[in-house]
Amino acid sequence: MYSPLDSMGKTELMLDLISQRQVALGSNLANIHTPGYVRKDINFNEYLGSMNSPLETKLSQKLGPSAIIEERYQEEIRPDKELIEIQNNSLLYTMAARRMSNIITEMKTVINVGK
């Protein structure tokens, strides 16, 4: 059975994970010339894959295995790749924020109809 509160919790998790990934990607870009810096990324397929929504399933297929910071020792930090990933991540955040807005609007409608 659909529950807006369940959906709100899932969307909140998505927003949090996307925010954490944005921080990791920004850190990579900021430390591009730091000797010995190890590239970091956050993947969260494990969390999104457990959600039962077509949007979340599509996101999980694109984003990777788990929501942990992966350190990639042999991977070179390329500014163009980091900027593309930051932009993609920003689009995902926008989609999740719109989803949260729709859930809130839905709840407001139910409250107003119930009066």
Image (cartoon, rainbow, N blue to C red):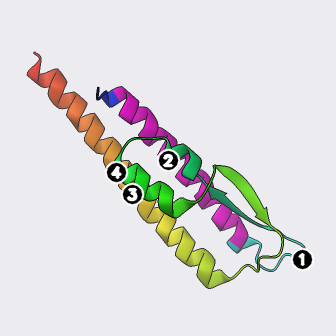
Q: Which mark is residue 54?
A: 4
In magenta segment, residue 21: yes
Disc 4 or disc 3, which is closer to the eye?
A: 4
Distance in Å between CA atoms under marks 2 and 3: 19 Å
Q: Furthest residue to the right?
A: 36
Q: Position of residue 114 (x, y in %)?
A: 11, 17
Mark 3: which secondary structure? helix
Could you say which disc has been placed on residue 49 in the image? 2
Crowd class of label 1 (few under 14; some 14 to 19; many from 20; radius 10 Å)? few
Q: Residue at x 76, y 80 (%)?
A: 76
- Quarter of the figure with the N terminus: top left
Q: Residue at x 50, y 63 (%)?
A: 62
Tell me, yes or no, whether the highlighted magenta stretch contains residue 92: no
**Separation of residues labelled 1 and 4 (CA atoms):** 42 Å
Q: Are marks 4 and 3 in contact (CB under 8 Å)?
A: no
The numbered mark, 3 or 1, whose residue comes first in the sequence reads: 1
Q: As shown in the figure, which amino acid type bears the numbered disc 2?
A: Gly
- As drawn, the residue found furthest toward the top would be 115
Magenta stretch mostly in which secondary structure?
helix
Of the image marks 1 and 4, the number of the one nearer the N terminus:
1
For the residue pair 7 and 46, the one nearer the viewer reads as: 46
Residue 12 vs residue 24: left or right? left
First reached walking from the N terminus: tag 2 or tag 1: 1
The circle on residue 94 is 3
Task: Give, as a three-letter code, the residue at label 1.
Answer: Pro
Which mark is first along the chain, 3 or 2?
A: 2
Amino acid residing under circle 4: Pro
- Using the numbered discs, state the Cα–Cα distance from disc 4 to disc 3 in whole angstroms: 17 Å
Find disc 1 in the rendering and name its residue. 35
